[in-house]
């Protein structure tokens, strides 16, 4: 702990100093740019989050139009799944931002996103469109991670929540507008291609800011490029992405492209299982990379509360994204809506979700208990999805809107709550890993839910519609169930539409049942959260870790004296020595920096000091061996023996002692 000696004889003022003059300065801003430059930089980063969110849902209402143009019904689900699969790179990108210059990585992922958007807009076939969506997903996840990284690096802890909240609101707005914008382009003369081309001019407008105003920030300035590359967990990144892709293909292709019992389908399941098992092994043993840089921290698997929160994030994020696809589809078939009208009908669901997410963000610091948010939220999700399961052709619009609002409000209660919660449940060094684990759970939920609901809907609709209209081929039925804008649906007579619509609605009811089961699982997982309190949710964004030092510096400038750092850390020789060196260097640096203010900085190292707790250590039979291993002196220090060091350092006798370290019955380096 720091000890300040205020020496009144050395005050710069001859008289008493009025307390009102002792103004403690606020924490110095961590960013090198201020004023209008910072405003432009932040304003230019926000659109990247907006475009990423927009692209996440923009294809919800353009699939029938795309299918009419390209055909290839087996690839149709992949224009949504492909983007979500690309977003699984959010965790690797987070690791990359922690190693390489943030600005250069940010510019690279923006270019990648724009290239993917251009490929989508100019796609000559379905395969090119899917490839473009994957590229855009990879780049978009990097943009999202980069914006969060810049905000974390360029803001203080006190102002960070404001900027983070701005990013979250923009994310919500982009998610809301995605289906609406996509439907509007699909119904306009500009065509669906501009749903992707629109990203290019927006990126061009803000390009000067990205190139010339965003500052360079290298988190590892002393490392070469080769050394930085070795800090990235390439093995686990590759196996995780490959395993996830195989799993998604197995779910998506089953019953549509391949029979469930076919060799191709079985091979996909086996490869996916093997690769994901390899991921777990690699996370444990992290070959080729230091454990501090591994993609996923294996010790999280020993924390049930962390696993619970990741599963909750997986369930709620997957449910929300999949709902944005099936609510418009439900209105298309039951109300005869076009893409634009169906997208607009999604607004009650999205707006209620965003509103309750903002309420959660505002109240979480005041009500920092985990259980109520998850219990109430998952309860609303269960109620809303259960009611949606009962919806049919005769259910009124008002009731369906109400059901959607229940699901949206419930999911909003905890869809973002997990991020600040996990930060309070792990050690400081594990906070980036915890946030990354939640982010990958979020993206994985989106991918798996889209794949599973697509498989359920297509398989059941194919079966039910073929029973009602045996004359339709399987490709025609797949085209039909894509939406009311599909070529096959438009070719049907009114009587034929009346025949197939109940079958499609019935198939869709199993999708609502899947959502209901996900909500029930989320609800069942909430009791283990009882008793957990996010103990620092209230202060995690307001604690100023540099503020004590600033206050001591300000006081010492007014009352020149001493600043003493007392070290009580103890560990085996190697880490203890490293920690000692770090504190010594800190003292030396502060001593040089603050010497002009007549501030002296030194440290005291008590080593092992006898307390009530050490009784059990000294009585242990192997204490002598441990003492030799730790490098201790033959006896423990008495707390009163520290008094001499304090008296000396806080007296005028130590007027020339600064930047020093005084060991008292110390361990390593005591001699």
Image: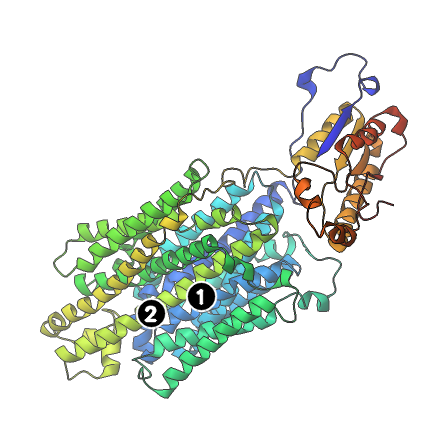
Residue with the mark numbered 1: 197
The image position of residue 519, as x and y in percent, is 30, 56
Q: Which mark is residue 452?
A: 2
Residue 31 has which mark?
A: none
Foreground of the two, 625 or 197: 625
In front: label 2 or label 1: 2
* Image quadrant assignment for residue 476: bottom left
Whole-percent x, y for residue 58 in the image: 37, 62
Residue shown at 34%/59% (left/top)?
319
- Label 1, secondary structure: give it: helix
Q: CB atoms at circles 2 and 1 under 8 Å apart?
A: no
Q: To which quarter of the image does residue 291 belong? A: bottom right
- Quadrant position of the N terminus in the picture: top right
Among the two numbered marks 2 and 1 on one chain, the one whose residue lies closer to the N terminus: 1
Q: In the shown orientation, is residue 38 left or right of residue 329?
A: right
Rendered location of residue 273, percent (x, y): 44, 76
Residue lying at the far bottom of the rendered structure: 263
- Between residue 400 and residue 430, name the one nearer to us: 430
Report the residue at 48% width, 56% height from top: 438
Residue furthest out toward the top: 15
Up-down relation of residue 466 to residue 241 (above or below): below
Does residue 244 show up? yes
Compared across the picture, whether 613 is left or right of 448 comes to right
Measured in 3D between alpha carbons, the distance from the residue under mark 2 to the one under mark 1, in whole angstroms, is 29 Å
């Amino acid at each position: 702990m720091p000890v300040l000696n205020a020496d009144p004889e050395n005050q710069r003022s001859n008289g008493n100093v009025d307390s009102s003059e002792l103004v403690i300065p606020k924490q110095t801003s961590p960013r090198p740019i201020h004023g209008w430059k910072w405003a432009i930089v932040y304003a230019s980063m926000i659109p990247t989050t907006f475009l990423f969110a927009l692209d996440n849902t923009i294809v919800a209402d353009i699939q029938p139009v795309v299918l009419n143009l390209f055909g290839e019904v087996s690839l149709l689900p992949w224009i949504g799944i492909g983007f979500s699969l690309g977003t699984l790179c959010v965790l690797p990108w987070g690791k990359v931002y922690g190693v390489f210059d943030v600005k250069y990585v940010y510019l690279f992922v923006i270019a990648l996103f724009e290239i993917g958007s251009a490929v989508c807009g100019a796609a000559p076939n379905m395969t090119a469109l899917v490839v473009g969506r994957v590229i855009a997903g990879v780049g978009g996840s990097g943009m999202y991670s980069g914006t969060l990284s810049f905000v974390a690096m360029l803001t203080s802890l006190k102002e960070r929540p404001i900027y983070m909240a701005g990013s979250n609101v923009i994310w919500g707005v982009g998610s809301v507008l995605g289906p609406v914008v996509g439907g509007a382009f699909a119904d306009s003369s500009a065509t669906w291609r501009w749903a992707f081309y629109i990203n290019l001019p927006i990126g061009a407008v803000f390009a000067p800011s990205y190139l010339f105003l965003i500052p360079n920030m290298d988190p590892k300035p002393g490392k070469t490029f080769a050394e930085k590359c070795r800090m990235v967990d390439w093995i686990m990144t590759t196996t995780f992405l490959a395993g996830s892709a195989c799993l998604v293909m197995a779910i998506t292709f089953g019953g549509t492209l391949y029979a469930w019992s076919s060799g191709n389908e079985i091979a996909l399941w086996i490869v996916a299982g093997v690769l994901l098992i390899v991921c777990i092994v690699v996370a444990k043993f992290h070959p080729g990379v230091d454990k501090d840089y591994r993609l996923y921290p294996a010790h999280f698997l020993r924390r049930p509360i962390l696993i619970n929160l990741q599963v909750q994030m997986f369930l709620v994020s997957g449910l929300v994204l999949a709902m944005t696809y099936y609510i418009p589809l439900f209105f298309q078939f039951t109300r005869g809506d076009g893409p634009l009208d169906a997208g607009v009908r999604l607004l009650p669901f999205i707006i209620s979700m965003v509103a309750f997410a903002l309420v959660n963000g505002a109240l979480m610091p005041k009500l920092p208990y985990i259980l109520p948010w998850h219990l109430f939220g998952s309860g609303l999700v269960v109620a809303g999805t259960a009611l949606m399961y009962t919806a049919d052709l005769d259910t009124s619009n008002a009731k369906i809107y109400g059901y959607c609002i229940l699901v949206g409000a419930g999911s909003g209660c905890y869809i973002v709550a997990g991020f600040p919660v996990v930060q309070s449940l792990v050690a400081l060094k594990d906070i980036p890993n915890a946030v990354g684990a939640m982010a990958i759970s979020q993206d994985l939920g989106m991918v798996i839910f889209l794949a599973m609901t697509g498989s359920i809907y297509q398989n059941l609709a194919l079966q039910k519609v073929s029973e009602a209209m045996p004359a339709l081929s399987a490709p025609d039925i797949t085209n039909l169930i894509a939406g009311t804008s599909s070529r096959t649906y438009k070719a049907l007579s009114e009587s034929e539409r009346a025949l197939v619509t109940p079958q499609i609605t019935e198939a869709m009811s199993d999708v609502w049942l899947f959502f209901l089961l996900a909500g029930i699982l989320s609800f069942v997982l909430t009791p283990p959260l009882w008793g957990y309190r996010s103990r620092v949710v209230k202060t995690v964004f307001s604690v100023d870790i540099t503020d004590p030092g600033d206050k001591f510096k300000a006081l010492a400038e007014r009352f020149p004296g001493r600043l003493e750092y007392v070290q009580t850390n103890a560990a085996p020789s190697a880490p203890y020595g490293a920690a000692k060196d770090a504190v010594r260097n800190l003292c030396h640096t502060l001593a040089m920096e603050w010497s002009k203010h007549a501030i002296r900085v030194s440290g005291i190292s008590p080593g092992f000091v006898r307390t009530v707790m050490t009784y059990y250590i000294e009585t242990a039979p192997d204490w002598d061996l441990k003492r030799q291993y730790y490098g201790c002196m033959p006896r423990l220090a008495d707390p009163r023996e520290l008094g001499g060091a304090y008296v000396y350092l806080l007296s005028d006798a130590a007027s020339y002692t600064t930047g020093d370290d005084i060991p008292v019955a110390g361990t390593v380096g005591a001699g």
